[in-house]
């Protein structure tokens, strides 16, 4: 019993009822003002023509959101759109919605008004009085058991109001919901947001992870060396790396603050010297060979290439320490080749193994290239090839 009464404790049940009543307000006013021109067919034609107006979709969508859906959590995708009609298909759905809402609203309003009159007639007949006769269901005779039947029309009114509200809500979700084109656009927007979040996560992992790795290696080497000059160089390298990390962090936060901000400020392979000097300052012997027109490499390729080189050097310092590193970056024949090779350590210390390598492979795959990471002839080898055309 409590379960049956639960819908009537929700405010949305009554707002849906109100929404159905509102559908017949203007036909009732028209009938009251001018009975000569009013017919059900005329009302349907006028309503259909109004549905062709683009703004009608906004008006009906706002009403349906407010009165039919109730309270919804923040961040949920809109189930009913409020943008003006953009295509004839949208206009056709609005016309159909208006006609269905008028018919269903007229039916629910009629039953809501007349069923309580049936209850009144049953009570009067049970008490021996004369029924008013204004209800659409005539009550004949005088019987005491009419009093037992009197609550039934009221229960039927409640059922009609609830069922009508549920039905009009389901119809609204079909006719006022997003069109296939709008659903596709929303899906594309959501995909772009997820890709942007993944890119920001990679930016933070690459820049901040590289800076922290260099700082840890430099601090450990300075403490072990016990040389004041080496300590000064280590502190200078930590300071420079920290400043560069702060610049990268500011760029990433700028993406979060301004979705339309261009990414042209991100570092490219033209800034690779900064990475190489940072690795050398950490004690690694870096043998670098940069060849080809790196400045002509397209921006997205150059920026991602910089990040892959940064991640590769970070992995060397994190897992192998201050070891000889051979770096080769070449742009020729319509492709960009990035290669990092270092002696393979006996054991791979430290947490987080594998995430950076997956990031390199994912970046290369997204750019239409390929990447190989793993042991090769006693060395740890990172080899990336990216198309630049």
Image (tube, grey):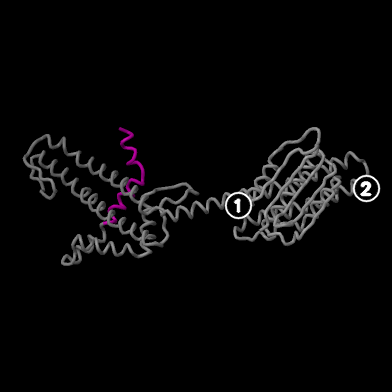
How far across and down, in percent of the image, does residue 11 sit? 36, 46
Q: Is residue 224 above or below residue 189?
A: above
- Element type at mark 1: helix
Query: Which callout, 1 or 2, points to the residue nearer the camera?
Result: 1
What secondary structure characterizes most of the magenta part?
helix
Tell me the residue that label 1 is attached to: 196
Image quadrant where residue 4 sits: top left
How far across and down, in percent of the image, does residue 57 sit? 37, 60
Nearest the viewer among 270 and 251 is 270
Nearest the viewer among 13 and 91 is 91
Q: Earlier in the sequence, mark 1 or mark 2?
A: 1
Nearest the viewer among 1 and 164 is 164
Q: What range is drawn magenta here?
A: 1-23
Q: Viewed as shown, does residue 306 lie left or right of 282?
A: left
Q: Mark 2 packing: few (<14 Cα in 10 Å), some, or many (20+)?
A: few
Q: Viewed as shown, does residue 387 lie left or right of 67?
A: right
Tell me the residue that label 2 is attached to: 229
Whether residue 100 is in magenta: the answer is no
Q: Mark 1 packing: few (<14 Cα in 10 Å), some, or many (20+)?
A: some
Q: Viewed as shown, does residue 357 lie left or right of 194?
A: right
The residue that appears at 85% across and 49% down in the rendered structure is 287
- Image quarter where the C terminus lies is bottom right
Q: Label for residue 173? A: none
Image quadrant where residue 251 sits: bottom right
How far across and down, in percent of the image, does residue 28 sit? 22, 60
The residue that appears at 66% across and 54% down in the rendered structure is 253
The residue that appears at 86% across and 45% down in the rendered structure is 283
What whole-number distance in Å separates the C-alpha atoms at marks 1 and 2?
Answer: 44 Å
- Element type at mark 2: helix
Q: Viewed as shown, does residue 54 lie left or right of 218?
A: left
């Amino acid at each position: 019993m409590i379960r049956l009464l639960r819908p009537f404790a929700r405010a949305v049940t009554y707002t849906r009822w109100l929404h159905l009543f509102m559908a017949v307000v203007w036909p009732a006013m028209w009938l009251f003002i001018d009975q000569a021109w009013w017919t059900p067919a005329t009302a349907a034609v006028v309503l259909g023509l109004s549905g062709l107006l683009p703004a009608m979709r906004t008006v009906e969508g706002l009403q349906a959101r407010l009165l039919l859906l109730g309270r919804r959590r923040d961040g949920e995708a809109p189930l009913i759109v409020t943008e003006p009609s953009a295509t004839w298909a949208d206009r056709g759905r609005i016309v159909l919605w208006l006609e269905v809402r008028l018919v269903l609203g007229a039916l629910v309003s009629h039953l809501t008004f007349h069923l309580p009159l049936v209850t009144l007639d049953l009570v009067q007949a049970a008490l021996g009085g004369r029924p008013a006769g204004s209800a659409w269901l005539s009550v004949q005779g005088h019987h005491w058991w009419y009093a037992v039947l009197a609550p039934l029309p009221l229960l039927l009114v409640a059922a009609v109001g609830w069922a009508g509200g549920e039905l009009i809500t389901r119809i609204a979700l079909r006719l006022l919901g997003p069109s296939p084109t709008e659903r596709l656009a929303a899906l594309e927007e959501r995909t772009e947001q997820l890709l942007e979040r993944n890119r920001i996560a990679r930016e933070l992992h690459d820049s901040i992870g590289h800076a922290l790795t260099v700082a840890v290696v430099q601090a450990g080497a300075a403490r072990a060396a016990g040389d004041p000059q080496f300590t000064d160089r280590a502190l200078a390298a930590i300071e420079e790396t920290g400043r560069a990390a702060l610049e990268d962090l500011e760029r990433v936060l700028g993406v979060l603050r301004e979705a339309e901000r261009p990414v042209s400020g991100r570092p490219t392979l033209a800034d690779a010297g900064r990475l190489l000097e940072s690795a050398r300052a950490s004690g690694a012997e870096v043998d670098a060979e940069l060849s080809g027109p790196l400045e002509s490499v397209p921006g997205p390729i150059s920026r991602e290439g910089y990040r892959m080189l940064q991640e590769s050097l970070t992995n060397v310092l994190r897992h192998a320490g201050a070891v000889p590193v051979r770096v080769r970056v070449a742009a020729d024949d319509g492709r960009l080749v990035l290669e990092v090779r270092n002696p393979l350590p006996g054991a791979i210390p430290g947490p987080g193994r594998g995430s950076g390598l997956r990031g390199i492979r994912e970046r290369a795959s997204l750019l239409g290239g390929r990447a190989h990471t793993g042991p090769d002839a006693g060395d740890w080898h990172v080899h990336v090839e990216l198309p630049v055309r």
